[in-house]
Amino acid sequence: MTRIAILDYGMGNLRSVQKAFEHVAREQEIVVTGDADVVKAADRVVFPGQGAIGGCMRLLDESGLRESLLDAMKNKPFLGICLGLQALFEHSEEGGGVDMLGVMPGRVRHFSSLGVAVKGLKIPHMGWNQVRRTRRHPLWRKIDQNSWFYFVHSYFVDADNPDDIAGTTRYGEDFVSAAGRDNVFAVQFHPEKSQHAGLQLLKNFTLWDGECQLG
Amino acid sequence: MSLAKRIIPCLDVDNGRVVKGTQFVDIRDAGDPVEVARRYDEEGADELVFLDITASSDDRDTIIHVVEDVAAQVFIPLTVGGGIRKTDDVRRMLNAGADKVAINTAAIFDPEIVKDASDHFGSQAIVVAIDAKQVDFSDQPRWEIFTHGGRKETGIDAVEWARKMELLGAGEILLTSMDQDGVKNGFDLALTRSVVDAVGIPVIASGGVGNLQHLADGVTVAGADAVLAASIFHFGEYSVGEAKEFMRRQNIVVRD
């Protein structure tokens, strides 16, 4: 039986993510864990996150899980959700500025920084919006172009390397709603709350071998 | 490509059972919150609101189990309201699987609960529910907040209150017109527009929906970000899918 570890580093409620995975992968073991050994032994790792990025980075360090996370990103199918996407980049302007994991080049900005382009748009960006797949990827299997996903966030990823971008969404202007490189994939939206399309993405992840080539 | 306007069926739950007589022909148990929630999910509901109307506080825990059961099977955002008194109640609902918790009367007695809860769980998890009645019918209308199902006045101006709740950390306003609730004449559009214009957070219009045009008006006339209805969906008059198709024809962006 393969095992999917959902990283629990004290950043809020992971029940929804766990339940959604249990729903799509009955033949796999889903564990919510803060134990570095369990993460190390897992076949796939999920990095969820909600709330403030400063707290997220601090808790990652306090829980001693930063290294486990970086390790998993080297060789295992890895899925970041919400802050789990943002944290992959170098720097966020949230809370006066926070340095993050820096796995992918780019910054995280507040929607208000778009200025006049988003006049009248509410922050947070909360609700259902469409994702445009910018390239093929095993995690997009059976998911239509411009499918709807559920978002809740006030900051967005501005990626420097176009090759890292896997999907974009328009809110005022286009932002990166999915990123991927090698065995790492991450999304700004909440697949666990995005009904069919979200569950399909999670299911794709449970079947993913970490290769980006489409068979 | 843009953010969709949301259609939100509301389920009143009394002692663990959906009330108001759901009449889906193909549902085995119309009182079972899980079955009803699944049905709305299949129809394309964008979110669900569960309103716990259980009178006895002894039976309050039943809603926790309802939320747990629904959250294990329905993968769209869930909001739970009714009987939320303190931050710990919010925590219990979120732990059970709710994504947002609606605070109503407790915020009036102690507005700091909104700040406390949003500090703890994030604004995105905190909805403030406002029940308002019109008190000034001049050409400069005013609405005030009423509690206890509209029977008890508070003297609080509804629009100012919404603004205050946003400042304290509310992530969304669930605005119900007590004048319109149950009357089926449509939302109080002037009230909704006043609150939408006063705050920068999303507003859910509620109270008074009798047909699909009422839902559309909530968005196009009043500017609501989401529209909530109970009876038109419960009694099978319209499906959520029909509501979406109707709104789409009026050029409102809705999720497919």
Image (tube, coloured by chain):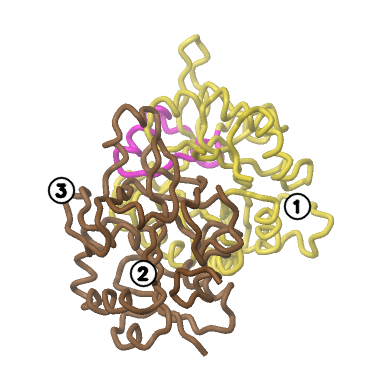
Tell me if residue B59 can be seen: no
Q: Are marks 1 and 2 in contact (CB under 8 Å)?
A: no
Q: Say which amino acid is labelled 2.
A: Phe
Work out whether disc 2 and disc 3 sit on a shared chain.
yes
Which residue is identified by label 3?
A96
Q: Nearer the viewer, mark 1 or mark 3?
A: 3
Tell me if residue B256 can be seen: yes
Q: Say which amino acid is labelled 3.
A: Gly
Q: Is A146 or B181 nearer to us in this picture?
A: A146
The magenta segment: B147-176
Q: Say which amino acid is labelled 1.
A: Thr
Up the image or down, A209 lies above or below A136; here it is: below
Q: Is B202 or B2 nearer to us in this picture?
A: B2
Quadrant occupied by the C terminus of chain B: top right
Work out whether disc 1 and disc 3 sit on a shared chain.
no
Which residue is identified by label 1?
B22
Q: Chain of mark 2?
A: A
Residue B31 location (% of width, % of height): 72, 60
Q: Chain of mark 1?
A: B
Up the image or down, B112 lies above or below A213; here it is: above
> Which mark sits nearer the N-terminus, 2 or 3?
2
Tint of chain B: yellow
Q: Residue at x 38, y 65 (%)?
A: A80
**Dot 2 alpha-carbon crowd within 10 angstroms: few under 14, some 14 to 19, many 20 or more:** many
Q: Nearer the viewer, mark 1 or mark 2?
A: 2
Residue A29 location (% of width, % of height): 50, 84
Residue A95 location (% of width, % of height): 19, 50
| Res. A47 mark | 2
Position of B243 compared to B69: left or right? right
Q: Residue at x 61, y 59 (%)?
A: A196
Q: Chain of mark 3?
A: A
Tint of chain A: brown
